[in-house]
Amino acid sequence: MRRHIALVGAVLLGAQALGAQVQTKQFDLGAHIGQQVFSKGTALENTPFVGLDATYQLPWNPLASLIKGSSFGVGMLVDVSRPVTRGDQFDAVAFDFGDTTFLYAVSQRVTLLHGGLEAVVGVPVGRMRMYGFAGTGIYSIFLDPRAVKRNEKFTNPMATFGGGLNYPISASIGVRAQLRTVTFTNFDRNRLDAGTTYIHDQRIRDALPAADPTSKNPTNMQFSFVFQYIPGGN
């Protein structure tokens, strides 16, 4: 009888220890604040942004046998910013008053939204943790209805990758420094022209400097500081 009691106690203690290992830091949340740096060809001014991410650490880790303490997870991201368009990247708008013509570069403030899914890998570096990620999602640009005289947005796929360093402050709280690249697809700079409701100048073609070369797939950068929370971290 005593042997049975001892055996049951050993099994319970082993299950408790195993459960503690499985629950270690499976889920974390991050709140971002940072600076978004756009490719010049997008005709968007650099601007601050805010965002959120959530990552779930999978029990299956393809790096476990190669790197001790490594992790592998899947995550979600969303961020928002309010950049201003660069009016000098579009044709000037002309207003005639008697024998005088005034030329203006027209800008607008748009709302940019990113959302997506990503795979995240992490490896320990002393007390800190280095991580990298890659994923895909969508970007949406909402035009200013006061500038373009209509409600309009456009949405296309995007790709993203990057990485950073994570410094734990406690079992549940940490901070991260992060760099992310975001590549737009099917991007059309002309859709950001806020001067389409006016008369474009067709007489003085060199009134503004030549626009920067543009691309259908521009790559932008995000530099951010992240506050991280790990529910039930241990």
Image (tube, rainbow, N blue to C red):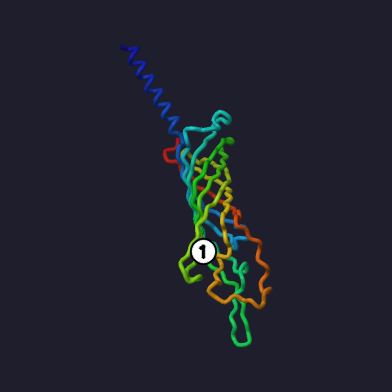
* Image quadrant where one finds the C terminus: top left
* Image quadrant where one finds the N terminus: top left
Residue 183 in the figure: left or right of residue 209: left
Q: Quadrant of residue 65?
A: top right
Q: Callout 1: helix, strand or loop? A: loop
Q: Is residue 50 visible?
A: no
- Mark 1 neighbour density, 10 Å: few (under 14) some (14–19) many (20 or more): many
Q: Is residue 19 visible?
A: yes
Q: Which residue occupies the foreground of this view, 195 or 124?
A: 195
Q: What kind of residue is marked 1?
A: Val
Task: Please say if 182 is above or below 169.
Answer: below
Q: Which residue occupies the foreground of this view, 89 or 170?
A: 89
Q: Which residue occupies the foreground of this view, 53 or 148?
A: 148
| Residue occupying the far left of the picture | 1
Q: Which residue occupies the foreground of this view, 55 or 193?
A: 193
Residue 68: x percent and y percent?
56, 30
Task: Please say if 194 is above or below 159.
Answer: below
Q: Quadrant of residue 185?
A: bottom right
Number of disc labels: 1
Task: Please say if 220 is above or below 1.
Answer: below
Residue 180: x percent and y percent?
57, 49
- What residue is at 59 percent from the left and 75 percent from the top? 200
Residue 231: x percent and y percent?
42, 41
Residue position for label 1: 110
- What residue is at 46 percent from the left and 42 percent from the top? 28
Residue 24 in the figure: left or right of residue 160: left
Residue 94 in the figure: left or right of residue 112: right
- What residue is at 57 percent from the left and 44 percent from the top? 164
Residue 141: x percent and y percent?
51, 60
